[in-house]
Amino acid sequence: MIRALIVEDEQYNAQHLIGLLSEIDPTIEIVAIIEGVEDCIERLETDHNIDLIFMDIRLSDGVCFEIFDAIEVDIPIVFTTAYDQYALQVFQVNSIDYLLKPIKKVALEQSIDKYKKLHKLQAFDKSILNNLSEVMLGKKENYRMRFLLSNNDRYKVIQTQDVAYIYTEFRLSKAVMFDKSEHVLPFTMEELETELDPKRFFRASRQYLVSYESIKTIQNNLNSKVSIILNNNVEVDLSRERTRAIKQWLDT
């Protein structure tokens, strides 16, 4: 089953798309229809179970590319638009197709097939890599201990044990140290999440990776969610899924 998010500010177009999708594959679940940039950012920050996005380019409160400037989106996207001047831009993000309105059933069906083939290939590749890693490393856990950072003609080494938390801003990953200094890291949040010890660092949201020592308090919110307050009073809201995960992580 594919869990799909529709980002479209015109209800007629959204309903037309839903109708075509139900004809192509009745098992596709539409999780929500979102009309604007800000609402889309909020949804993607809290819902980590979306498989595919159908996204219009011009939305009620801006252009969809503002979403990718605000957060990192690693979900496959099929862009749906009445304008053809954005073709180059959409392939600079995580796009698998670009459909011009009015959307035709045949073209949409080809996009769905492309997604399914890509999904199978990624799952296959991941399985192979996991098996090779276990064989070659003997399941030994090796995590990054330090970073070597370049600054003009100088280099600086920072220790991961001195990192309080890492956040992303304007597509840059920044490490905040316990002494409150900041350093830009030449890695994506996904790369950092795999390279840092998960016993020490927790992916609290798409934008924050925090060490357990940096968490000052945990605050209960509505709907069984929590916020974590970091040492320098930065507040990070957790989704319901991440709330469950951090409780298990802190209790081990």
Image: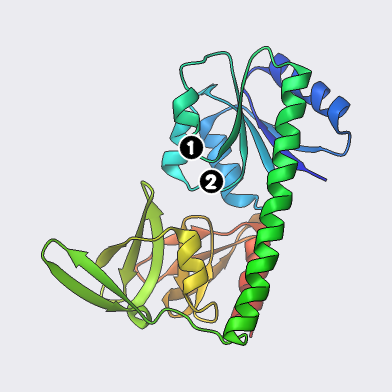
For marks 1 and 2 on the same chain, the one whose residue lies earlier in the sequence: 1
Query: How far from the left and from the top, in percent, is residue 98?
Result: 59, 26
Identified by mark 1, the residue type is Ile
* Disc number lying in front (1 or 2): 2
Q: Is residue 32 above or below residue 238?
A: above
Give the number of the disc on residue 67: 1
Picture quadrant where residue 239 is located: bottom right
User: Do residues under tags 1 and 2 come within 8 Å of each other at their CB atoms?
Assistant: yes
**Towards the viewer: 242 or 215:** 242
Q: Is residue 6 left or right of residue 30?
A: left
**Towards the viewer: 134 or 20:** 134
**Towards the viewer: 38 or 221:** 38
Picture quadrant where residue 112 is located: top right
Identity of the residue drawn at 41% across and 40% down? 69
Q: Is residue 119 left or right of residue 95?
A: right
Query: How far from the left and from the top, in percent, is residue 17?
Result: 75, 22
**Towards the viewer: 196 or 222:** 196
Q: Is residue 202 above or below residue 161?
A: above
Identity of the residue drawn at 71% across and 57% down? 123
Identified by mark 2, the residue type is Val
Query: How far from the left and from the top, in percent, is residue 94?
Result: 54, 41
Q: How many residues crowd mark 1 within 10 Å: few (<14), some (14–19), many (20+)?
A: some
Q: Which residue in the protein does label 2 denote?
A: 73
